Amino acid sequence: MRWQSSIFAIALVLAAALTAAAQTSTLDFYNSGVHKYRQGDLDGAIADFSKAIEIDPGYWKAYNNRGLVKRKKGDLDGALKDYGRSIELNPNNAAAYSNRGVARRDKGDLDGALADYARALQLDPNDSYTYNNRGSVRADKQDIQGAIADFSRAIELQPDFAEAYFNRSVCKRRQGDENGARADRAKAIQLDPQFGKN
């Protein structure tokens, strides 16, 4: 009886060690995918995120990040599928909703994008990037007041957000507020001289 208990205890230790090794491998592949993405190796990043998912099919972060890379490569359908899976696995994942909103806008699904941004902001009401992105979609839909409100909120949350100033300047110009548009454009250029080329 004692012998069987020892074998059972050894089996438990081995199972725990294998589980820890799999988790380490999942994290290793995930981190490698993030590194490759930052280095511009998009195919390598997709391969590493896919390997992390293969090891742990419930790893929602890997789906979200693989979606980012797929979108960057122009595979919008693949990106939408990965974001959707990430959301299924973690419905409180604000980033995946926000990222899916970007991909939906890219595909021309403005209403879908707005719905995703609304959910993302319910989950994380302090995400300046989501406000900026939603403002762009509102501008696309000719909701200039709503767009300006979103760009203004993005700036409140992140006062050095050059893109939000620039986007707000475009909307203010469309509204006929030339002085406000000039001031916002000047601020955008001050924060990021790239906006002087637009």
Image (tube, grey):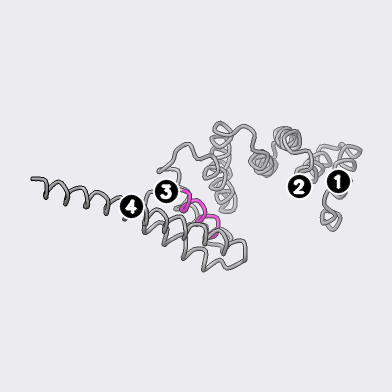
Residue 68 appears at what percent x and percent y?
A: 55, 55
Q: How many marks?
A: 4
Examine the structure image and report whether residue 31 is included in the region drawn in magenta: no
- The kind of residue tagged 1 is Arg
Which of the two labelled residues, at mark 2 and mark 4, occupies the earlier sequence position? Answer: 4
- The kind of residue tagged 3 is Arg
Tell me the element at label 1: helix
Residue 134 appears at what percent x and percent y?
A: 64, 40
Residue 185: mark: 1
Which of the two labelled residues, at mark 4 and mark 3, occupies the earlier sequence position? Answer: 4
Q: Residues within 10 Å of mark 3 (few under 14, many from 20)?
A: some
Tell me the element at label 3: helix
Residue 19: mark: 4
Q: CA distance from mark 1 to mark 4?
A: 54 Å
For the record, the magenta segment spans 61-70
The answer to whether the residues at label 2 and label 4 have Cβ atoms under 8 Å apart is no
Residue 4, placed above or below residue 75:
above
- The kind of residue tagged 4 is Thr
Residue on which disc 2 sits: 163
- Which residue is more in the foreground, 112 or 163? 163
User: In this rendering, would 174 be left or right of 128?
Assistant: right
